[in-house]
Amino acid sequence: MQKPAPDRSDEEPSEQGADRQRSVSIFDVAKAAGVSHQTVSRVVNDRPRVSKATRERVLEVIDELGYKPNRLARALAGGVVRSVTVLTSDTTLYGASLALRGIEEAARAAEFAVAISVLDEHAPLTRDDVASRLARPGEPVVVIAFNASGERAWRALPADFPAAAVVERPRDGGGLRGRPEAWLDDRVAAAQATRYLLSLGHRTVHHMAIPSSTTRVGQRAEGWRDALVAAGRQVPEPLEGGWTPRSGHQAARSLVADPQVTAVLCGNDELALGVLRAAREAGRDVPGDLSVVGFDDALYAGYTHPALTTVRLDFEGLGRGAFGMLHRLLDPDNAPAPPLWAEPELIVRESTGPAPGR
């Protein structure tokens, strides 16, 4: 015998019903309220030239129908869509990709549309070139300036454009032409990681550097040097590692073959992957013979063999903070305070240990 269908009268609306609810348009609201869709648009966008009685009637219908205005609906109804352009370079880089995600999430929450323009590493990026990349003239901009092309775009941006940036730790405290900048203290974090390796008994620490956006020597390399000098230790010549595991592997092969090298601080986790591979090929045990520390705490860092000791950086929080700064710049009276982001944190895992013989 077939069982009777269960009573679903008290359950949440079905997915199909939810779709119908979401499909309520500005024209449905206008028809039910007995006004034009332009009037509904003025109410939604809190504009003048609507009587109190009409405004109340429209708001009542909006609540009754469950109408949820969105950016597209506002645009179709003649409303103004707020938007922001993000200028970034290599979106495959871990930090840049997460910063971009944070910017996009914060912008969406504030009902801004987001356009993304990827910068060419070799382009001149003049003032006119940067301006031509914006969806609209004078549109607000967030620049991800972790590398040289992003830094050039940030400096070339016309001074009258509202803008904020995610940058490498600035030497002068930040604020190019008084503009807001969000940054993490890579220098202090690198010094902390270096001191940790010295505390394990390593006589010195070698460094495989990522390219700097602002100077020949990046902030992570500066922090590494600070710690060694303060401890009175030898400061080896840093290696230029690039960004990728392949470049890290190539740069590390001769380094890890030297048994006197017992600790390496890498400019990012991808370089650390290359160092781990080179150490294995050279017959060096990690961490028995060689300790390796990365930077960024990429998603895979805890799953390498051995699991990678690294510095965790809150790139998503940095992106949200940069957009928050821009939003406050655009609307100082109504925009919320920019959110804070987490400070760098050393995450100790399996790739570091006492110096050989300790």
Image (cartoon, rainbow, N blue to C red):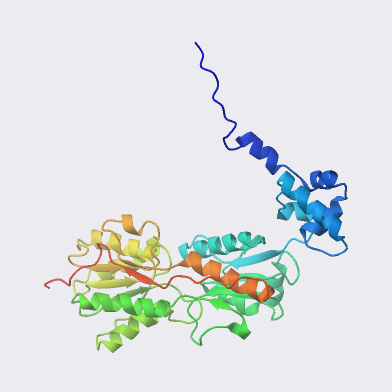
Q: Is residue 340 left or right of residue 344?
A: right
**Which residue is found at the position 88% from the left and 50% from the top?**
36
Could you tell me if residue 42 is visible in this image? yes
> Measured along the vertical axis of the image, is residue 3 above or below residue 151?
above
Quarter of the image where the C terminus is located: bottom left
> Measured along the vertical axis of the image, is residue 39 above or below residue 343?
above
Rendered image quadrant of residue 78 = bottom right
> Which of 69 and 281 lies nearest the eye of the viewer?
69
Place of residue 205 in the rendered image (x, y in percent of width and height, measured from the top left): 27, 77
> Which of 89 and 249 lies nearest the eye of the viewer?
89
Place of residue 276 in the rendered image (x, y in percent of width and height, measured from the top left): 29, 62
Extreme residue in the left direction: 357
Extreme residue in the top direction: 1
> Measured along the vertical axis of the image, is residue 76 above or below residue 172?
above
> Which of 241 and 105 lies nearest the eye of the viewer?
105
Rendered image quadrant of residue 192 = bottom left
> Which of 68 and 139 lies nearest the eye of the viewer?
68
**Which residue is found at the position 19% from the left and 62% from the top?**
285
Place of residue 314 in the rendered image (x, y in percent of width and height, measured from the top left): 45, 67
**Which residue is found at the position 69% from the left and 73% from the top?**
331
Give the number of marks. Answer: 0
Place of residue 190 in the rendered image (x, y in percent of width and height, measured from the top left): 36, 77
Could you tell me if residue 125 is visible in this image? no
